[in-house]
Image (tube, grey):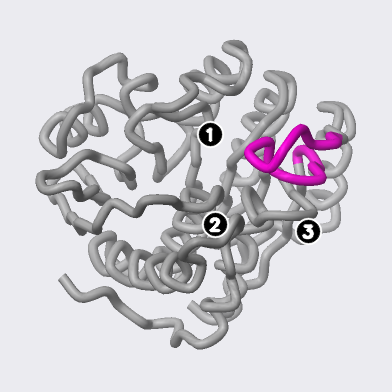
Amino acid sequence: MTGARILALSSEVVYGPVGNSAAVPALQSLGITVLALPTVLLSNHPGHGVPVKVALAATDLAAMLDRVLAGGWLDGLAGILTGYFTDAGQVAIVAERLVRIRHRAPDVTILCDPILGDDHTGLYVPLTVAEAIRDRLVPLADVIAPNRFELAWLSGRQVRDAGEAVAAARSLAPALALATSIPAEGERLSTLAISRDRIDKIETRCRARVAHGTGDLLGGLYLGHLVKGAAPGAALAAAMARLEAVLDRSEGEPALDLTALNGLEAGHEAKP
């Protein structure tokens, strides 16, 4: 697809790319135009210390979305990425607008990155936000991109390996799941693209230390390849190759070094 445009709704940070600050450069590296709307502006990820935080009120988020809808700037949209939300009101506003957008752009691909928590912290958003994402956004999505903890929480199932990840993903409404951080043998992790009739898997080594934002980066890359016409397995291979290049460049650094994206061809694929 030429001239693809994606609406990205997530957090934005000044230091240490996470949320839109990771997903937007990933999408732009694929030649995609991004309409980025931050749900919250942070000085930094909390992993780098207590941040200064300015959240967009749900009423302001509604006004922003309604203005871009009225301007016709979301007509023909190829994809939508949803990520971090600060309160359930924001989630409700976005869910309502997603229905309107899909009516005007029926072929839009909606990827919900359900940013809820991880194995080290449990839920790190309020329960009301987690429940709103589960009940309002996940059913509207074509694709979800949960980590192991989030997939288990959303499905109410145990997720200890790839087989359980497949069962959990297929119990949810979206037709496609990008499941990350799934334990594999030999100190490795699996990333899986799980559809109703196919499973694609790539295993990578566990790294001693990984900067925050890898999930946001991978979600953006994966959606970007999907809207450019790649099949789920090919999108997984291409997205993982670019992610690994960034992680190699960022080894030992406190934040992701996204300059690795600059030297990669948009169609660069991972080796099995």
Residue displayed at 23% across by 45% down: 194
Residue displayed at 11% across by 48% down: 186
**245 or 12, which is in the foreground?**
245
How far across and down, in percent of the image, does residue 124 sit? Answer: 57, 23
The dot on residue 79 is 2
Q: Please state which amino acid type lies under the numbered disc 3.
A: Gly
How far across and down, in percent of the image, does residue 177 sit? Answer: 32, 43
Snapshot quadrant of residue 262: bottom right
Q: The C terminus is located in which quarter?
A: bottom left
User: Does 129 appear above or below 71?
Assistant: above
- Span of residues in magenta: 39-53
Q: Secondary structure at mark 2?
A: strand
Dot 2: within a 10 Å radius of its alpha carbon, few (fewer than 14), some, or many (20 or more) residues?
Answer: many
163 inside magenta stretch: no
The dot on residue 72 is 3
Q: Is residue 256 left or right of residue 247?
A: right
Q: Earlier in the sequence, mark 2 or mark 1?
A: 2
Q: Is residue 199 left or right of residue 67?
A: left
Q: Are marks 1 and 3 in contact (CB under 8 Å)?
A: no
User: Does 239 appear above or below 60?
Assistant: below
Residue displayed at 36% across by 82% down: 268
Q: Please state which amino acid type lies under the numbered disc 2.
A: Gly
Distance from the alpha carbon under mark 2 to that under mark 1 = 18 Å
Q: Secondary structure at mark 3?
A: loop
The dot on residue 3 is none
Residue to which mark 1 is pinned: 115
The answer to whether residue 23 of the structure is visible from this angle is: yes
The answer to whether residue 76 of the structure is visible from this angle is: no
Residue displayed at 10% across by 44% down: 185
